[in-house]
Image: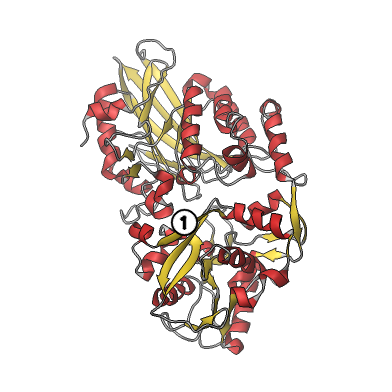
Amino acid sequence: MRSIVSILSAAAVIAAVSCSGPKDGDYSLTLLTTNDVHGTFFDSTYVGNNVKRSLYAVKYVVDSVRAAEGAENVILLDAGDIVQGDNAAYYFNYVDTITPHVYPRMAKYMGYDAVVLGNHDIEAGHPVYDRLARDLKAEGIPLLAGNAIRNDNGQRYFPIYTVLKRNGLKVAVLGYDNANIAGWLPERLWSGMKFESLIPLVQDDVDAVIAKEKPHLVIVAVHSATGEGDGKVLESQGLDLMKTLHGVDLLVCSHDHRPKVVESDSICLINSGSHSRFVGHGKISFSVKNGKIIDKKLEADLLPVERSRIDTKMSQVFHDDFKAVKEFTIKKVGDLKVDLVTRDAYKGMSHYLNLIHTISLSCSPARISFAAPLTFNGTVKAGTLVYNDLFTVYPFENQVYVVNMTGTEVKDYLEVSYDNWINTISKPSEHVLKIVNRQDPRTGAESWSFVGRSYNFDSAGGLVYTVDVTKPFGERVGIESLSGGEPFDPGKTYPVAMTSYRASGGGGLMVKTGIDTGKIEERVVEMYPEFRKLLYDYLMDKGSIDPAAIGDKKTIGEWRFVPERIAGPALEKDMDLLFGKR
């Protein structure tokens, strides 16, 4: 276990004015939490008059609780993934880097006591999250990530904890990022540090903080999914922690976007989901006798956020920021001559992935590209394109890497990918797509959905190949040639364009192919900017997205499911179940 001295050297300690200790009597403390807000700062979709859930609406809920419970009895935390996923986050991350970032100003206005770093915050890069940490600190709010360990001296890169005082009570709040950063992101985004597993680190830190600070209550917030509690998934350690932590009253989880509450007599777990849909709500009721807490009772639930009930004063305060983002968002960037529909990619070639492959293959020296539909069911209609549309086409800040792979690895990779989303069938009446009728844990609604995640359903550009749905895994993919007609050689090395997420091991496709992503730098021959910038540059150069240009088979190649007499009807049937008949 690290020494208490080294742990405390990185800690931020913030204390509100209070009396020296709690008086005897009955008390309650309320914890409110958000997580995975993903840039939902403003309540407008920027284009049209649609209203979305936002921090304005979260503020309304928080103020309602503060009014009912007393502001001095409420703590407000966020568990990470803040500055990625929306035009507002993108604008203040990369476009306007002079104006103080909007999120720290909003966090101060809303009265956040602490914020935890998420993996998508790390994805924004050192300039963004280092600035975020500085700006939050200037507002009196610590950015916590206790498992980020510096490579040079073994100390913590971010603060581990903060101590809050409420009615003479000391409340320790510890925060941690996801432990699987290396499986999500290239090392250059988190250079100078490494991320440790939350077990046993969190318990070691809790013990050290209790010994030093002697808090009355302890809260742990982690940017880690709830998980199954089986200790097998590094990025989903929520229930693992709940089962093993001692001395902790409330545990906040996140990352998986799935609202969840788990209660017990000694600790409660709260995961508020994502995108400002809920506010996590934990309550600790207790008595104090002779300076000690007795008769402690824990409760937890989720408070729904109504998108139309907002803090109107907050919307006025940040109106100029919203206007700046909107003006950037509605700027014309080109013309689209065909609808881009992401769901078409599940049954074969599509205009959407043709575009992705075309741009990826322009990243020299790429000869092959791998790409997947990044939105489950997104559509961009033909017509004038504004910058806002580029977020629908490509919602993430992934870079493009060109990685050397052998022909055998390319074929094996495609076998792994297609096994994520198709079954082996012998007749059209069977399910060719791996789908199931189940309740969505994020919404509660029952519907047909993929067993796996569609953003891991990669197809290839630059090749001519077939996928035989009647054959088993390992024998489905038949590669005929490269797109220009050159024979495909399993023993030859090919430069392959893919996202930085995929190259770093995201989705597990590279690992299942047998590639050590921990040594991916040895295979990377070129790195390009974020794909959305490449898309923007393409539009600035071409002026439009034309199906004839992005569908050039000499560039992108061609693939299809075979045999058509079985695959065709089976795909149509399953697509109807997923999306309804068209």
Residue 401 drawn at (x, y percent): 48, 59
Q: Position of residue 292 (x, y in %)?
A: 29, 19
Colour scheme in use = secondary structure
| Residue located 42% across and 52% down the image | 186
Residue position for label 1 = 501
Q: Residue at x 70, y 38 (%)?
A: 308
The vertical placement of 79 against 580, above or below, is above
Residue at the extreme front: 365
* Residue 274 visible somewhere in the drawing: yes
Image side of residue 517 versus residue 327, left or right:
left
Q: Is residue 168 left or right of residue 275?
A: left
Q: Residue at x 69, y 49 (%)?
A: 388
- Pick whichever, 418 or 277, lies toward us: 418
Q: In the structure shown, which secondary structural element does the residue marked by tag 1 occupy?
A: helix
Task: List x then y, in percent, for residue 216.
Answer: 33, 23
Q: Nearer the viewer, residue 77 or 158?
A: 158
**Crowd around label 1: few <14 · some 14–19 · many ≥20 (10 Å):** many
The quarter of the image holding the N terminus is: top left
In the picture, measured across the screen, residue 231 lies left or right of residue 310, that is left
Instruction: List x then y, in percent, for residue 421.
Output: 50, 72
Rendering quarter of residue 383: bottom right
Q: Residue furthest top?
A: 19
Q: Is residue 40 visible?
A: no
Q: Amino acid at mark 1?
A: Tyr
The image shows residue 167, relative to residue 358, as above or below, that is above
Q: Is residue 409 left or right of residue 453?
A: left
| Corner quadrant of residue 248 | top left
Using the image, determine if residue 113 lies above or below residue 264.
Answer: above
The total number of labels drawn is 1
